[in-house]
Image: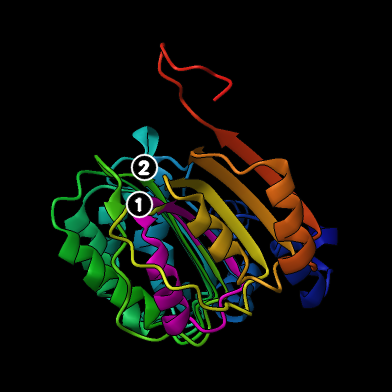
């Protein structure tokens, strides 16, 4: 310990950066007054991941340490899995106001337990002015679609948010409800729990005009009145599944992505043959560098596979 204490503060801060905040406080706090002072007053880059923490560790950090260092937490991960059940609700009961987290840049919430909790949490978000990354995972019955409209508006209101990630299972795949607020900062959106109509894609880019990376489901039915419009900002597109009986819509959509560099697409029902793909890429996707394609179609037992 004597040699360790001789290290300058800058070296100690570099060392602290390698630790999850839970371990950092457990190992170094209360060893001596100098370390306590550094941890509580001068270290400004805390990263807390409570995914695998015990209930005792979680309670200790939230109740005894976070009130003193909340304004210096950069990343925070909370989870509601078996070993950490009710962690998200507990956190917000321990920390009634999230306004203290003035330098939080990344907030990860895994397994959000209900739509009510989801909405309640996002209503607290308006204080997080420096948030740039928001990965959210949820598994619950989503009975009120209007709730998601409110949730989406709350999230898109962040002035610096660049990455937004919605992943999870909600009893069935709902239609996506677009935000009614504009985001000038969003560049990366990942949505696996909701499905888009093709006509919503252009609306999405109207409200997120700097979007470059997009991962979504598309379900285009006969009532989807899609009008092809150029989307020049998009460079990376992943379509988990493109459900449509009209392949001309797929082709028309892709023809308007002139700056696309990466395309990962799964098609269902009707297939696009290799010659058509060659024409699409050659004449409309000239900047494409990476192309991953998966196509599948189910045949009835009495259907001729050669048709």
The numbered disc on residue 59 is: 1
Q: Quadrant of residue 280?
A: bottom right
Give residue 180's position: percent from left, percent from top.
Answer: 29, 82
**From the image, which quarter does the C terminus lie in?**
top right
Give residue 229's position: percent from left, percent from top.
Answer: 51, 78
Q: Is residue 130 above or below residue 141?
A: below
Q: Nearer the viewer, residue 44 or 246?
A: 246
- Residue at 26 percent of width and 42 percent of height: 172
- Residue at 33 percent of width and 85 percent of height: 181
Give residue 197's position: percent from left, percent from top.
Answer: 36, 60
Q: Nearer the viewer, residue 47 or 5?
A: 47
For mark 1, does the 10 Å Cα neighbourhood hold few (<14), some (14 to 19), or many (20 or more) residues? some
**From the image, which quarter does the N terminus lie in?**
bottom right
Please give the range of residues in magenta: 190-218
Is 199 colored magenta in this rendering? Answer: yes
Q: Is residue 248 visible?
A: yes
| Residue 210 falls left or right of residue 100 | right
- Residue at 39 percent of width and 78 percent of height: 156
Q: Is residue 30 visible?
A: no
Residue picked out by circle 2: 55
* Gap in angstroms between the C-alphas marked 1 and 2: 6 Å
Name the outermost residue toward the left.
Answer: 144
- Secondary structure of the residue carrying tag 2 is helix
Q: Nearer the viewer, residue 15 or 211?
A: 211
Q: Are marks 1 and 2 in contact (CB under 8 Å)?
A: yes
The numbered disc on residue 223 is: none
Name the outermost residue toward the top.
Answer: 301
Q: Quadrant of residue 102?
A: bottom left
Q: Quadrant of residue 294?
A: top right
Q: Nearer the viewer, residue 240 or 221?
A: 221
| Residue 208 falls left or right of residue 279 | left
């Amino acid at each position: 310990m004597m040699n360790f204490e001789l290290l300058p503060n800058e070296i100690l801060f570099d060392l602290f950066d390698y630790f999850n905040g839970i371990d950092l406080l457990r190992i170094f706090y209360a060893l001596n007054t100098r370390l306590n002072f550094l941890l509580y007053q001068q270290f400004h880059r805390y990263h807390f991941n409570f995914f695998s923490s015990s209930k005792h560790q979680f309670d200790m950090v939230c109740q005894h340490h976070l009130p003193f260092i909340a304004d210096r937490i950069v990343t925070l991960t909370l989870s509601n899995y078996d070993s950490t059940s009710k962690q998200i609700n507990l956190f917000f009961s321990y920390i009634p106001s999230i306004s203290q987290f003035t330098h939080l840049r990344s907030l990860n919430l895994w397994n959000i337990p209900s739509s009510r909790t989801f909405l309640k949490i996002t209503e607290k978000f308006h204080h997080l002015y420096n948030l740039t990354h928001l990965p959210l995972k949820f598994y619950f019955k989503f009975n009120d679609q209007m709730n998601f409209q409110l949730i989406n508006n709350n999230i898109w209101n962040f002035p610096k948010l660049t990455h937004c990630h919605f992943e999870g299972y909600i009893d069935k795949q709902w239609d996506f409800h677009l935000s009614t607020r504009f985001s000038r900062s969003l560049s990366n959106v990942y949505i696996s729990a909701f499905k888009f109509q093709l006509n919503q894609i252009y609306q999405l880019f109207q409200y997120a005009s700097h979007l470059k990376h997009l991962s979504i489901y598309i379900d285009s039915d006969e009532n989807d009145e899609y009008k092809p419009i150029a989307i020049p900002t998009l460079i990376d597109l992943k379509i988990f599944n493109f459900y449509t009986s009209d392949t001309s819509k797929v082709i028309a959509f892709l023809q308007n992505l002139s700056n696309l560099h990466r395309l990962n697409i799964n098609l269902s029902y009707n297939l696009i043959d290799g010659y058509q793909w060659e024409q699409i890429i050659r004449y409309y996707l000239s900047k494409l560098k990476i192309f991953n394609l998966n196509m599948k179609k189910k045949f009835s037992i009495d259907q001729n596979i050669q048709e």
